[in-house]
Each structure stands twice: as structure tokens, then as C-alpha cells.
Amino acid sequence: MSQDELSSYIEYENFIKIILSILGLKTSATDSNSIINRSILHLQMSMSLLPMIGIYNFLKTYITNVFFVTRGLSILVSFLTIIIKGFCIILNRQDVNELNEILSSQYHKFISNPKMKTTILKQVTTFRRLSYTMTIFVAISCLSYVVIPLITMINQSINGIKPIKHILPFPAIYSWNIPPDSYRFKLHFLNESLTVLSVICITVGVDNLYTHSVFQMIGFLRVIAYRMINFNEQNKESSEIVVRECMSQYETLINCRNKLQKIYGPIILWTMGTNAIILCAVIFQLSQMNSISVSRIILFTTYAGAKFSQVFIYAWASSLLTAESDKCRAAIYAANWVGNKRFMHSIIIMLSQKPLILTACNFTVVSMDVFMGVLNTTLSYFLLLNTFAEKT
């Protein structure tokens, strides 16, 4: 079983390395941050500027139509989300690289120990599958914006419909004329298609880096708990060395927790706040449609699934880290240290530490309670919006 979990972790880690490369981050301690790598995120973020202008004009034009406003607003908020995520990674690039180096290098040492490997790799399959699920939802929902207009235009051409109605991926209105079947239309279609790819890359990359870091931090806690419970069974190390090393590892964990909060605090706070609005907009659009095509069902289902999974993985991973931190403190307390004055002081210091809790900008604790709060807020917004639509 441990071999299957090790294979699962290697697959998971290779997936994360691909993500780091896509975001222009270091995949190992020997990599260098070249100018090209540093420019990748800037280029991906810049792709969304032109569509954002078009969607903003679309919102101004149809400001009195609740259906069109919710449609445009959900996409505009998604673009703002990737810009915020991109800026958080750019501004904290050094912390992101250091966090990855610290956790990955230590984690490889831990899993090389046959005694601890099974304990450390527990739940790796769950983390990997959640990452893949979220990635699939994001990819399908985003690519649908490009695929659906392409299929529509191809069908018109096959059926001999003239003139062909040319459709851009996003509901956008530009200040300049875009003649159908012109180079200008093709350039706009290309730009919006590249924007879709940048949304996929940044969303999948940033969100999965968070869960991967939390999983490795959980591994740290399991190592500390294992060594504290079994420190009397060590043949080569004295008890004092074990306790001292565990204290050092716990300090490293606190440092990693602080870096993670610094990087992801604004991202989580924004995601939790805006995803409720986006989910409300998606549900409202579905409720206002008289008939729904299969393509639209796929688009809305995967889009809502992507937003739900984003909120869930942040909340679930953070709650799991806090629960594992409590287990670690319980294991330290249960260790055979009572009456041993040589390291009693160190044990008391470790027990006095608070559990590892992740917060978003010191505003709220990231836990499953936040996930439930987003669901409740979504429902409240939908009922309010539905009432407003009925009155208008």
C-alpha cells in the first residue's frame, strides 16, 4: 500500500512541478529565476486587459438588464480574481520559492525513511484527486467559452447559413468596429482564447500550490508526532537530540505557515467573498432561462463546480492542517517525558504553542465554517436577486 501511495505522491509532485513551470516559478533549488520566467505571469495577466474593457462596456450598455449584468459581472470578477492571484505571487515570489524549497527538500528526506513513509503519505491520493478534479472543472468551464462559439460558427457554415453570425467567446462590446470574418475579429478571438488559457493556468496553478504546501506541512506534523512518540526506541540518537530536532522542525513549520498566510491571505479573502457572488450569478442565469442547451448545461455545471471546488479545497486543507496540529500536540503530550528534567523544558515549550491555524489577512480563520458561510451567502444573494428581478 505504501508503494502505491509513494507512486501517487510522485505523480502529484510532478503535476506541481508542471504548475510551477507554467507560473514561471522555480521547480528546484538549482533553478534560476530568469527574466523570461519572471515575465510569464505578467504576460498571462495582460491577456485579460482587453476583454475586461469589452465586458465593462457590455455591463454599462445593459445595466438595466439583470440577466446580462449577472452574466458579465461573473466573468469580470473572474478576471479580477486571476489578476489578484497573479499579483500576490509576483509580489511574494521569493517567499513562494523559499516555501517550496523548504518543504520539498525536507519532505523528500522524510519519505526516504521506510518507518515513517506510510504515515507521512496518508491521504496523498485524496489531495491528488481533489487537485485533478478542480483542474478538470476549471479547464472544461473555461474552454467552453471558446469551444461553444467555434462549434456554433462551424455548424452555420456546414448548414449553409448566410451570413454566418460570428461570436466572440465573451460578452464584450468594444469602442471600435469589429467586422465579421475580418482579421480584426480573428485577432480579438485569438486574444480572448489566450485569455481563457491564462485563466486556466493561473487558477489551477495558484490554488493547487496551496493544497500541495498544506499537504507537506501536514507531513511535517506527522513526522514530529512519530518521533516524539517513539524517541525511546531510537538506537543512534539520544532523546535530547530528537526533541531538539523536533523543536527546530516545528519552528520551520511556523515560518512556513506565516509565509503561506502572507502569500494567500488576500487570495483566500477575495475568493471566499467573490465566489458567493459568482455562484449566485450562475444559479440566477440558470433560473432565468426558458430552455437550456446541452452545451450550456456543461458550461454552467463545470463553472459552478470549479467555484465550489476552489472554496472547498482552501477550507478543507486548512481545517485538516489544524486538526493534524492538534494530533501532533496530543502525541507530544503522550510521549514519555514526565520526570525527565533534561528535556522537560523543551516539551513544555512545544506544548505551549498554539495549533497551526491559517487565517486570511488576520480577518478570518480559514476552515470548513468559511465554506458553509459561502454556501449560505450564495443562497441569500440568489433570493435577493430573484426578488429584485421579479419587481423589475
Image (tube, grey):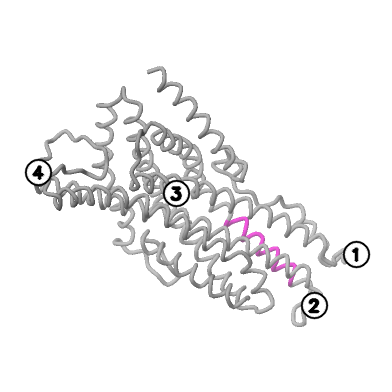
Q: Are marks 4 and 1 in contact (CB under 8 Å)?
A: no
Q: Are marks 2 and 1 in contact (CB under 8 Å)?
A: no
The location of residue 217, given as percent across then percent down, is: 60, 61
Q: Residues within 10 Å of mark 4 (few under 14, many from 20)?
A: few
Which residue is farthest bottom?
A: 235
The residue range painted magenta reads 242-256
Q: Which residue is mark 3?
A: 306
Q: Which residue is mark 2?
A: 233
Q: Amino acid at mark 3?
A: Ala
- Most prominent secondary structure in the magenta stretch? helix
Image: 237 above or below 358:
below
Q: Which residue is mark 1?
A: 339
Q: Disc 4 and disc 3: Cα gap in Å?
A: 37 Å
Q: Disc 4 and disc 1: Cα gap in Å?
A: 90 Å
Q: Residues within 10 Å of mark 2 (few under 14, many from 20)?
A: few
The location of residue 156, given as percent across then percent down, is: 16, 48
4 or 3: tag closer to the N-terminus: 4
4 or 2: tag closer to the N-terminus: 4
4 or 1: tag closer to the N-terminus: 4
Q: Are marks 3 and 2 in contact (CB under 8 Å)?
A: no
3 or 2: tag closer to the N-terminus: 2
Q: Which residue is mark 4?
A: 162
SS label for mark 4: loop
